[in-house]
Image (spheres, grey):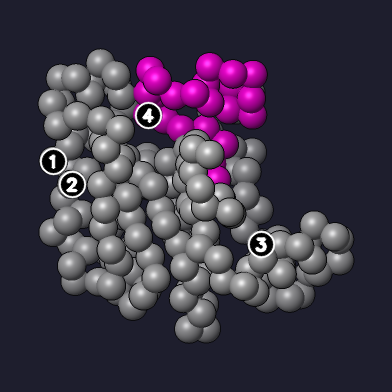
Amino acid sequence: PYCSYPLIVEIYNFCQHDCLYCFTKHKETWHNKAMQRKKRGFNKILDILDIGSLKAIFSGEQVQSKKDLLLKSFLDQRYAIQIGAQTDPGGRLEKKYGRTFELLKLLKKDGNYYPVRISTKGSAFKNGKYLDIFNSYRQATILISIISIDNNILKKIEPNTPQVKEQLSLQNLLPKTSVKLGLSLR
């Protein structure tokens, strides 16, 4: 019920924003286990999406299990994919690892502009390589999630998020692309 999109993709298995209200870090979930691994350092284990497997299913190369067949059928219907619901696909991890960029390249491959909605508090998408990929991405929306325009409040509640001005700077860059920009005010 929190995110109504039928397919939600999490790129990373934890989020660096450390928001006080985050429901995933207050439960015994994959997020808490990932936070324990985070303390030992960042590594490939932190990825929860196997982009290679998704690519094989997306292209029809790997449709063996019932789960693969269901996912392939779902993808063929071109339902929009929500990227990021419990973690941020455009935060500091993205700046370091570029996993969201790899997924977007896959979803845009061969003129197949697969519909996506990306929810973020981060600022990774200001980089030119993202703007290049968004340039002709016709069915994409980026929702910037903010709780306040007061940076002092943000530092207390969302200690590791960029300042609002940095988050909103996408509004000056995205009009040059086909991507729609929205605000998620919570």
As drawn, which residue projects farthest toward the bottom? 111
Residue topped by disc 3: 54
From this viewpoint, is residue 169 visible?
Answer: yes
Residue topped by disc 2: 168
Q: Is residue 143 above or below residue 106?
A: above
75 displayed left or right of 141: right
What residue is shown at x 64% (from left), y 38% (from top)? 45
Q: Is residue 149 above or below residue 169?
A: above
Q: CA distance from mark 4 to mark 1?
A: 16 Å
Residue 173 in which image quadrant: bottom left
Can you give x and y, in whole percent of width and height, for residue 11 in the image? Answer: 53, 47
What residue is shown at x 36% (from left), y 44% (from top)? 120
Q: Which stretch did the figure color magenta?
A: 9-32
Q: Are marks 4 and 1 in contact (CB under 8 Å)?
A: no
What residue is shown at x 55% (from left), y 45% (from top)? 10
Q: CA distance from mark 3 to mark 1?
A: 35 Å
Crowd rating for badge 2 (residues with CA inside 10 Å; few <14, some 14–19, many 20+): some
Instruction: Report helix, strand or loop for mark 1.
Output: helix
Find out whether residue 16 is within the magenta segment: yes
Residue topped by disc 1: 165
Crowd rating for badge 4 (residues with CA inside 10 Å; few <14, some 14–19, many 20+): some
Mark 2 and mark 4 lie on one chain; the one further toward the N terminus is 4
Instruction: Report helix, strand or loop for mark 4.
Output: loop
Mark 3 and mark 2 lie on one chain; the one further toward the N terminus is 3
